[in-house]
Amino acid sequence: MPESDQNQNLGLSIRSLFYQNLYIPLTESQRIWNDITLLKQCFGYDLITIIALFHQYKMSGKIKLETVNNAIHSITFDNGQIQFIELADTDTRLGTLIVNHRLITKPMLDKALAEKGDLPIGAYLVKKGLISKEQIGMVLLTQSRLRLSKLISDEKFNISIEQVESKIQTSELNIGQFYLLINDWILSKFDHDWIHAHYLEYYNYKVQVNWDKAIASEFQKYSLIYLSNENFIELIDQQTIQDLSVLFEKNSNLFKALHFLIIINWIEITPTNEPALPEVKIKHIYKLLMNKSGPDLLYTASLITKQNSQDIDKIYEDLMQNYLGPESFHNDFKLEIDKKMINLMINQKNMKQKSADFSTDSLKPKVHQQIDLQLIHNYIIAQKYNEALIYIKKFKDLIETESKLQLYSAWAHLGLALFKGTQISLMTLEKEFTSILPEDMSSADYHYVNYLFLKVKKQDTPANNSLKKAISMDSQIKNYPVLKSIFDWFN
């Protein structure tokens, strides 16, 4: 593949080469470095794998990420540990977060910024005795979680890697906390089509459980495992991914769970000598494409083939030759896919729009619509849960970037169950609650919603602890709707 093509898309061979470092153990760190250098571009989803490999092989260096709008982000590592995460935004700056945590006021921050000189703002505030080292550590941990969470998405980055020496650690994120975040990110943020398309090329790989690392006592820490099946680890051992895709065909979390377990090194996958059955693959490709048309169809097809989303001819050729196969000519699913793709090609060629209209970044149009979060919040506080859910559903269908909607959705469903007597399955509540994103888990409202969730599960002691934490963060929580005698212990 010419270098220019590598710079334009996620070439199948280049991307596969990089992921072999994750799937095949005992890789040398120099090979990982070289393969990232070749990668040129990555999705936000790939960053989890990159970070995990840096940690596993204790690598040092700086990953630079450039957006289509030329914004530059970076993650700096020393000996596998994240040292610093630089994000081209303003709302995750340390000073802003310190104010948001109500550790100091905005006027105090402005004065400190004017006086600190060359000292980092955190060090200056500690030196002046305005906040403690422990409080700075808490804010730095929140900053790391927020910045990483903003990067984990279907956004595409130009990626480069360079050698740097950084001994100044501004991240408090350890590997245990990172694994918990991976669980949340994969469950809540990973696009269904992306993860399913990613594993299509690994259908003939066999799963092997690392039983010395997959410690049973830690299973409950990770909700992804139990969402798939309580005996999931035992069921997947020595099975091919193709077999698992059939066994768990109706479980949308299969590939998310596998991806998580591979990243935390609880399982390995290695290729077998047997090719994947084309009929199984074709059926799953059909399921990915069947309800899509236009740009959505083209985007998903580009995910499957890893081809440049602007080159529909190349996508079609690769899909037909490498994923559907000539030997399955009479397969009904293949014929339907072929028909959809040909119609798409005809429509595209008849359109007079510029080819840039179908770049990866325009394939999934973002709807810029103002969300009245306060209105939804007011409905919930007033116990108008159904009205809140109507607004939540409307905005969730239109806007993908407002994470707080997940928190409010869980809150409204829990309110219906606790305060209105509405019959809602625990599975539904569990799904809503686990979909709350990490960036919303440090607010007082989250701890109140966590209290409601634990109360539904009849876990009274941790529920009350969560409620106490919510009130300690914001005394207004005492005015929220409560069950009878909930606050007896507090008074």
Image: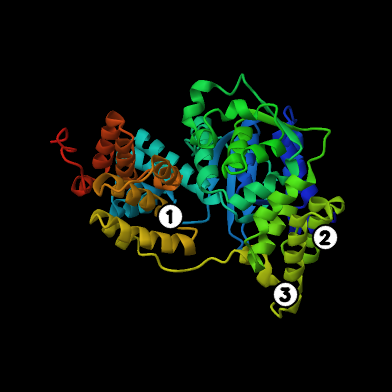
Measuring from the top left, give residue 384's x and y in whole percent.
26, 58
Q: Nearer the viewer, residue 191 or 342?
A: 342
Q: Nearer the viewer, residue 220 or 93?
A: 220
Spatial distance from mark 1 to mark 3, Cα to Cα? Answer: 42 Å
Which amino acid lies under the numbered mark 1 shown in the image of this protein?
Asp
Residue hosting label 3: 347
Which amino acid lies under the numbered mark 2 shown in the image of this protein?
Glu
Dividing the picture into quadrants, the one containing residue 341 is bottom right
Disc on res. 91: 1
First in sequence: mark 1 vs mark 3: 1
Q: Residue at x 31, y 31 (%)?
A: 459
Quadrant into which the N terminus falls: bottom right
Disc number lying in front (2 or 1): 2
Q: Nearer the viewer, residue 375 or 319?
A: 319
First in sequence: mark 2 vs mark 1: 1
Spatial distance from mark 2 to mark 3, Cα to Cα? Answer: 17 Å
Q: Residue at x 20, y 44 (%)?
A: 482
Which amino acid lies under the numbered mark 3 shown in the image of this protein?
Asn
Residue hosting label 2: 317
Q: Residue at x 53, y 55 (%)?
A: 88
Disc on res. 260: none
Res. 160 in view:
no
Disc number lying in front (1 or 3): 3
The reply, left or right, for residue 112 in relation to residue 88 is: left
Q: Would you place residue 99 above or below residue 126 in this image?
A: below
Dividing the picture into quadrants, the one containing residue 110 is bottom left
Spatial distance from mark 2 to mark 1, Cα to Cα? Answer: 44 Å
Farthest top residue in view: 212
Q: Are marks 2 and 3 in contact (CB under 8 Å)?
A: no
